[in-house]
Image (tube, helix red, strand yellow):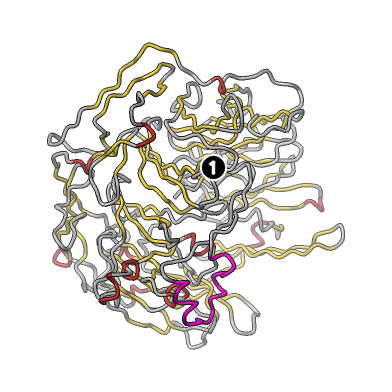
Amino acid sequence: MLVLTTFHVPLFMLRLGQSNLYRSDDYGKTFEDVTYLINHTFIQTEFGIAISPDHSGKVILTGDVSDLGGFKLFRSHDFGLTFEPTDLPFEPLIQMLFNPADCDVLLTLSITVQALSIRFSMRVTNSTQENNICEIPSNLHGQLIYFFVKNLLKNDKGMLELRRSSDYGRSFKTVASRVYSFVLGGRFVFASIMTGSGTERMIHVSVDGGEQWNMAQLPTVNHEQFYSILSASQELVFMHVDDPGDSGVGTVYVSDDRGTVFSKSLERHLYTATGSDTDFTVVSSLRGVYMTSILTQDGAVETVITFNQGARWQLLKGPESSRCDSETSANRPHRCRLHIHATYSTSLKLNVPMLPLSQANAVGLIIAHGSIGESESVLSPDVYISDDGGYSWFFALKGPHHYAILDSGGLIVAVEHTNSPVNQIKYSVDEGQCWFSYNFTSDPFHFSGLDSEPGSRSMNVSLWGYRSDYSRWVVITVDFKKILSEDCAEEDFEEWLSHSEPSGGSDGCVLGFKETFLRLRKGAACFKGKDYETETEIAPCPCTPSDYHCDFGYFRQENSSECVEQDELKGRPLEFCLNGTTEQLQTSGYRKIPGDRCMGGFQPDRKETDLKRKCISNALQPNALVSAFTVLLSSAVIGVWLVKKYVCGGRFLVHRYSVMRDNVEANKIEGVDDVDTNYMETAKAQYNEDSDQVYMT
């Protein structure tokens, strides 16, 4: 572990600051002050520590020695054992960013030299000399760097040029004009382009780095609306399109494998604020599973889940043992549904210290805060766990907690979220069904958070906090291998067929195949170890309607597997632009989910015909540039999409949770101010005209 502490205060024209670097090689059990390795150089808080995505031993620190006339870059190849300093011939504005395609290359911004490409092991090797770069929203893809170019003589939004460099800034090519915003990830590049007239814009997509663009089959939006990419993979994209007006909801569309043809997936999707205030969550512990929140017609927030990449959504089931099993639930069904608290809840300042948690190597396991509709549980939600990827849930812990997954799901730990000092950690070895307590210190401290080694394979967890006198931070590491000292044997595992509901309602066929895992039996008190790999058996399945998204122009109604025509597209020819020519779609309403492996079975008719008619958006034709412009440099992580908008803006709506307001008004519940009752109704929203958003999970 490397820990950087920083402190600085402004003093007239000066800034007094101090930082210390600490290193631990025993999971945080002991730390050594190694500030001397960087010559006691001050590291600004906003610079922090940067770690290479290809090797955690490659670490960089950007040191501020401006009182001596400059900045230094400190590089380590050995997990912080040694650092090599390099003088920087510029003043960086942000921390250095690694290029994930070539982690020996760093990128940053500077006041004097605007776009810099730096070799990890050398000094500056090349740079661009453009002026007035003001931010770097993270769009670097191999050697490709994308720039916004804005004509300073025009204030019209949506008049940006999108330029691309394929040689780290030595030369540039304009790939699109009239750009409102853009984002990229994997093989997709998306640009929000102004249409020929008015304030409307539409999404264009490229799969070849911007050489050729296709118009995505999505509704256009006006200046009061926005697009938002919720999730993306190499196969498909989830796109939120904001509804007109100030409803605070929108529609989720799912793309084909070209990112061009989109299908309506989910209506009334809750997305009300700037940045990332949506509950859209990718469940990484089971393929094809996503959760999010919708807003019902009566203003209640409910959690829905899909198990087949958005082809069909359903309401989340509440635990069978919950107290919603009552006669009154027949009239108020949302009292019985489990609502999962995610980003939207945290934006309301509810008592939710952690978002839903899942890990790829902890098969089927999801841990989350939730409530069953009563207002008391909304104000202080409990911890619920699913061990089958979201099909069923059970109550795990009373009240809010911090939690972590260890030993590939063989161990779960949790600490109560409280303002009082704590000295107890809870742990479970059966995926949350039974819990034990361990006093980790005789001197309680104010708990701030917990962390473990990335990958959830470790048996160690570090707890962070401070003593009552606020004199210093404290790190306490608990090694659970002292408790679970026995290696897991073959008899400790059992076969589990994923996507098979306990009620027998599913045969495990999802996305075209069955997947059987060998996973730890409940109550097996052993540890898997860091080298544990999940064993899987795969069997193909015949195709059924659940293996298909509804095609362009079709959608599934609630609780139905049938795809029906959208009213607004009935009787209209289904045409779209692909690679510069118009394609006509003849479909019975079904399009196979990208990545689905089913064979035989249900095979609906679908045909795309090239009409031999050229088509291209004139919005993409580059306009002549003038000498006065501003460049916005973007650099992005492959496969990891970062939140970005060109200008932050959006709406701040707050909706009630199920029956929460009714209980509050009737019972005068204490603490309801925590959810800001002034915004219980969907009052007139505030928005920013530049509001295309990206929220990647």
Residue 289 visible in the displayed image: yes
- Against 341, residue 446 (above or below) is below
Q: Is residue 340 left or right of residue 444?
A: left
- Against 440, residue 39 (above or below) is above
Residue 478 visible in the displayed image: no
Viewer-nearest residue: 66 or 337: 337
Q: Is residue 119 left or right of residue 133?
A: left
Q: Position of residue 676 (x, y in %)?
A: 57, 69
Q: Quadrant of residue 497?
A: bottom left
Q: Position of residue 392 (x, y in %)?
A: 25, 64
Q: Quadrant of residue 400?
A: bottom left
What residue does disc 1 label? 226
Q: Main secondary structure of the magenta part?
A: helix
Viewer-nearest residue: 163 or 66: 163
Query: Farthest residue in the top direction?
Result: 612
User: Which residue occupies 64% across, 84% down?
Assistant: 469
Q: Look at the image and give the residue range highlighted in magenta.
A: 660-680
Q: Amino acid at mark 1?
A: Phe
Does the segment drawn in magenta span residue 673?
yes
Q: Secondary structure at mark 1?
A: loop
Q: Position of residue 312 (x, y in %)?
A: 29, 48
Does the segment drawn in magenta span residue 430?
no
Q: Position of residue 498 (x, y in %)?
A: 20, 55
